[in-house]
């Protein structure tokens, strides 16, 4: 063997060792990342530092809302088996000053009932949101949602909604406990609400848009999703199980529109937070299989369990330009429940695709 051949062999051996080492390190890095994700490494959305500038609430032209889309873009539905709900046993406790507000509410409702002035507001068992966290599956980046809840009741929710009421030291719950730079960080006692919001589209492509009744306690008269249903411990946790969000959505469809599960398909699109009122929501899209708008009106005319929740239902062609014009109507644009416009946008994206929807929305806004 010549000196040149020997030198080439030595160089080749050295390069082989170098490349083998680099390849081994690369494969180890990849395997470590997969193992981390498979082991449940969580990207926390509740206690994540420095996220304030990256999060903004939903807006569309002149329409501004306090709805923060926390997970989901409408394009791909979140699978039912990817939502994990845990109920913690310890009930929510309000700070001392706010506990007095709850006592005031309870005393007023007892007084109204005793005097016969009006029917009292029922102090129904509810859930408060301890945290909502998102992880990703290792191979296809599918969302895994981890929702942790605590028991609470409606009077506690009403007390916690007084976010701008002054406490003895002059502060408010909003100023003392909330940081606008970190909108997902909040104590559970200020988040005593979780509901499902559903965009219902008929078989002849009409979006049902409801107006909340004037007699409801929260957001009376505002225009809202087709169906809105809050989690109820005594109904949705029968048998001491954690609530199933798809089952809650089906309950809302039955109670508010007299629709049964075999009459529609259901897709979970997103999780959103009203950062102003600290109310969480799961956004669903429901497509009626065979029922037209006229048939739905006829069905509802024969009786609805929760008739009092809605005073009006409009039917809007489920096309991007039509829905956008409806959202931005002068008599609508400032009369929306905070989470509804984002829900309708996501439903449009789910059906028509993001590029088409955003193009139509931009053209409609320019023509205003």
Image (cartoon, rainbow, N blue to C red):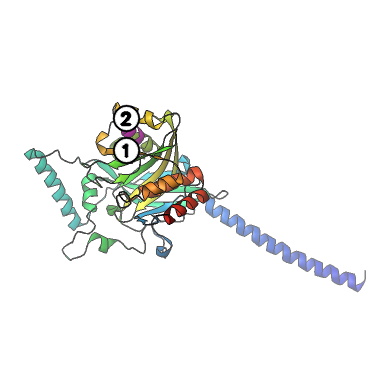
For residue 184, what is the image quadrant?
Answer: bottom left
Q: Secondary structure at mark 1?
A: strand
258 in magenta? yes
Viewer-side residue, 98 vs 262? 262
The residue that appears at 27% across and 53% down in the rendered structure is: 189
Residue 32, position as x, y percentages in the image: 58, 57
Residue 234's x, y, as percent? 28, 37
Q: Which image quarter: residue 31?
A: bottom right
The percent position of residue 339, horizontal first and vertical second, equals 35, 49
Checking the image for residue 300, the label placed there is 2
Name, please, the residue furthest toward the top. 302
Asked whether disc 1 touches disc 2, contact meaning CB atoms under 8 Å apart, the reply is yes
Is 318 left, or right, of 171 in this rendering?
A: right
Whether residue 255 is in magenta: the answer is yes
Q: Which label belongs to residue 313? A: 1
Question: Magenta region: which residues?
Answer: 252-259
Q: Is residue 91 above or below residue 236?
A: below
């Amino acid at each position: 063997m010549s000196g040149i051949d020997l030198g080439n062999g030595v160089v080749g051996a050295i390069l082989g060792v170098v490349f083998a080492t680099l390849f081994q390190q690369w494969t180890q890095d990849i395997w470590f990342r997969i193992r981390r994700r498979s082991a449940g490494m969580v990207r926390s959305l509740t206690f994540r530092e420095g996220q304030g500038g990256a999060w903004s609430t939903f807006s569309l032209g002149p329409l501004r809302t306090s709805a923060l889309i926390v997970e989901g873009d409408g394009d791909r539905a979140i699978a039912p088996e990817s939502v994990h709900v845990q109920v913690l046993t310890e009930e929510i406790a309000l700070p001392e000053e706010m506990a007095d507000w709850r006592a005031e509410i309870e005393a007023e409702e007892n007084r109204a009932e005793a005097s016969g002035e009006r029917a009292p507001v029922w102090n129904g068992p509810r859930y408060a949101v301890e945290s909502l966290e998102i992880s990703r599956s290792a191979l296809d980046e599918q969302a895994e949602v981890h929702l942790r809840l605590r028991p609470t009741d409606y009077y506690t929710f009403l007390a916690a909604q007084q976010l701008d009421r002054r406490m003895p030291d002059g502060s408010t719950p909003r100023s003392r406990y909330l940081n606008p730079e970190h909108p997902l960080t909040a104590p559970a006692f200020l988040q005593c609400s979780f509901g499902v919001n559903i965009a219902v589209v008929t078989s002849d492509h009409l979006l049902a848009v409801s107006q909340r009744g004037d007699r409801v306690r929260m957001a009376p008269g505002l225009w809202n999703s087709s169906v809105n249903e809050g989690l109820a411990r005594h109904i949705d946790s029968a048998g001491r199980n954690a609530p199933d969000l798809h089952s809650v959505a089906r309950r809302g469809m039955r109670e508010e529109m007299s629709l049964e599960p075999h009459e529609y398909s259901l897709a979970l699109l997103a999780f959103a937070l009203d950062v102003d009122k600290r109310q969480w929501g799961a956004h669903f899209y429901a497509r009626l299989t065979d029922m037209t708008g006229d048939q739905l009106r006829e069905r509802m005319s024969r009786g609805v369990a929760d008739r009092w929740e809605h005073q009006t239902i409009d039917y809007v062609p489920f096309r991007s330009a039509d829905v956008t014009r409806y959202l931005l109507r002068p008599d609508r644009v400032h009369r929306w429940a905070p989470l509804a416009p984002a829900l309708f946008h996501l439903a449009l994206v789910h059906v028509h695709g993001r590029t088409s929807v955003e193009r139509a929305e931009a053209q409609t806004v320019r023509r205003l």
